[in-house]
Image (cartoon, helix red, strand yellow):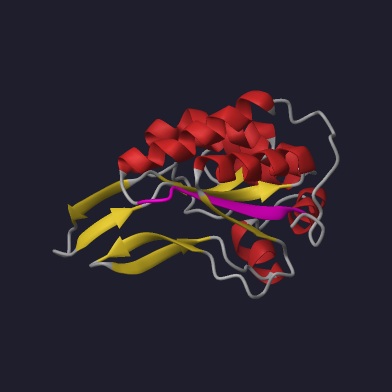
Amino acid sequence: MSRLDRNRWRSAQDLGQLGGLMALWLEGHVASWPGYQPNWGPDEETQELIPTLAAANRAGYVTIASQPGIGPVEGFDGQIWQQRAAVEGFVRNYDLLRALVDAAEKAGLEHEIVDTLDTGERGIAVTQRGGKPYTTFGGYMSLAELRDTVWRGIGRGALDDVFRAVRVTLAAPEYGAAAGEKLWSALNGVIGKHGDPALPHGTADAGTAA
């Protein structure tokens, strides 16, 4: 990571500023973010999702993982792969959290809310290889993992906000692109109503949101 990018992330003092930097990384204006390979942007498969993801980050849903719905298709290894559209990120704004959950339930999406004390959460399977679960979004992350891997080097205030936030995972009900539209439509609807991260609206501290 360049010195410029390190300084940018170190200067983030709350979750709102972290979301602003994530949006800039998604859009190609920041070369690196702490939880990803240095000087790499979003995966090619997520390019069409960038406007939605950037807007979500600026609204206070600070994303760390996302993927479109795909498949079933034959992969490089000869196995059949398929993906459910899914997104995972941090939220402190209680109204935004409530809106995400309400939209997920209305659209029939799978969803999980995890705080930093939820050691029993196992996440949502979002990718299959050969008919068996292969990757998951969500699930438990330790304080050390959050501090030293996902958000290494961010400002102390922003890291405190991450620890106080809840992590929200949303996933389409079925595999494939068509079902994925339910997720992105629901997320766009929420963003359209909660697009100003400067509004306080209360917070969703760890241990209080579920």
Camera-nearest residue between 174 and 54 = 174
Task: Please identify the quarter of the rendering in which residue 62 is found.
Answer: top right
Q: Is residue 84 left or right of residue 26?
A: left
Measured from the top left, where is residue 177 in percent x and y? 32, 41
Above or below: residue 53 compared with residue 104: above
Part of the protein shown in magenta: 165-174
| Residue that appears at 44% across and 41% down | 41
Above or below: residue 148 compared with residue 102: below
63 magenta-colored: no
Camera-nearest residue between 132 and 63 = 132
- The secondary structure that most of the magenta stretch takes on is strand
| Residue that appears at 60% across and 34% down | 56
Measured from the top left, where is residue 105 in percent x and y? 58, 45
169 magenta-colored: yes
List the single residue furthest toward the bottom: 120
Camera-nearest residue between 169 and 38 = 169
| Residue that appears at 81% across and 55% down | 160
**Camera sees residue 138:** yes
**Camera sees residue 24:** no
Measured from the top left, where is residue 168 in percent x and y? 62, 52
Above or below: residue 160 compared with residue 101: below
